[in-house]
Amino acid sequence: MLDLAPVRAGRSVRDALQVALQTAQHAEKLGFTRYWLAEHHNMSGIASSATAVLVGYIAGGTERIRVGSGGVMLPNHAPLVVAEAFGTLAELYPGRIDLGLGRAPGTDPMTMRALRRDRVESVDDFPRDVAELQHLLCDAEPGQRLVANPGAGTNVPIWLLGSSLFSAQLAAERGLPYAFASHFAPAMLLDAIALYRHGFKPSKQLKKPYVVIGVPVIAAPTTEEATYLASSVFRRVLGILTGRRGLLEPPEQGFFENLSDAERDGIARFLACAVIGDPERVRIGLQALLDETECDEMMLVCDVYDPALRLRSLDLTMAARHAAADVPA
């Protein structure tokens, strides 16, 4: 599962963080493989900006599930700082920490300047920073002058994240697992997967391609209720598309139907991989995505305003997954 720790209208940031932990604990009971948090900045509706801190909070409140970043936006950080943070997490929670990396800033230009100060990015920076991180997290070599401590020797698994072809190609060249952000940018999903699999070179970390796809999911006993609950997501997506981001709002009956054709089309493109409906519709939707992509895992995004109904949605989705036994989780 991928969680942005959404801040709900009428509730606090503290509540958002507590809901994230409760959701992770529930996901662990359901048998989910991993729980990732995403780095965003200067957004009132997202509480996951201090991603490494939140990873530690979630890992400390769970027992078995892998916890990681989905991802850390590497241009915002020095590789040494990331290696030390996730090396510390790996020492605290051995065998349970993932480090997913993105090359976007995860914010607006003004905040990007505040994060990077005067640093100017080039196309070569991200591959170079990924290589430096790999070096810092593996065993230190004799005489190595710069050592991440904690970090060296932890071999925290590195994942590359992306919504275009750039990271797919880099993940293939480096022999790293690849997660495509189809939960918000599905347009290039199949092209990116094909490029990654075709160009993949085995590495010490990974012998064959490994693909994760992001899937927005909202399940309810009826499709009508699921669509109603999804109106909170529709409103948030519309805010992203129009530059008016905000808190996660309660669902609103008829919200989608009352939008203009252009607004509905924009939301539909954004959520082209979304699976929304009753358990049977969810089962069919998940199986269709699996058949189309042959992915190794699905990274679910489930943003429901009512935390209890969010957990119910995960219950129903997992039941649908078991009904479609081939769907990975």
Image (tube, rainbow, N blue to C red):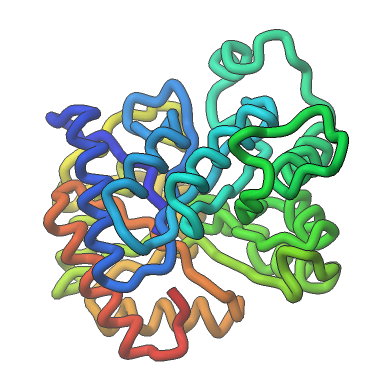
Rendered position, 42 above or below 316: above
Q: Choose between 29 and 225: the one closer to the eye.
A: 29
User: Residue 160: x and y, percent?
Assistant: 67, 52
Left or right, 87 with respect to 266, comes to right
Q: Choose between 194 and 224: the one closer to the eye.
A: 194
Left or right, 111 with respect to 136, comes to left
User: Residue 117: x and y, percent?
Assistant: 66, 10
Q: Choose between 12 and 182: the one closer to the eye.
A: 12
Rendered position, 256 above or below 30: above
Q: Residue furthest front?
A: 142
Left or right, 96 with respect to 190, comes to left
Rendered position, 172 above or below 81: below
- Decide if residue 257 is in sight here: no
Q: What residue is shown at x 52% (from left), y 80% (from top)?
A: 290
Left or right, 123 with respect to 77, comes to right
Q: What residue is shown at x 40% (from left), y 56% (from top)?
A: 35
| Residue 42 falls in image quadrant | top left
Q: What residue is shown at x 50% (from left), y 59% (from top)?
A: 95
Q: Choose between 121 and 246: the one closer to the eye.
A: 121
| Residue 15 falls in image quadrant | top left
What is the number of callouts on the image? 0
Rendered position, 11 above or below 161: above
- Decide if residue 187 is in sight here: yes
Q: What residue is shown at x 26% (from left), y 34% (from top)?
A: 7
Q: Quadrant of the N terminus?
A: bottom left
Q: Quadrant of the C terminus?
A: bottom left
User: Residue 201: x and y, percent?
Assistant: 85, 68
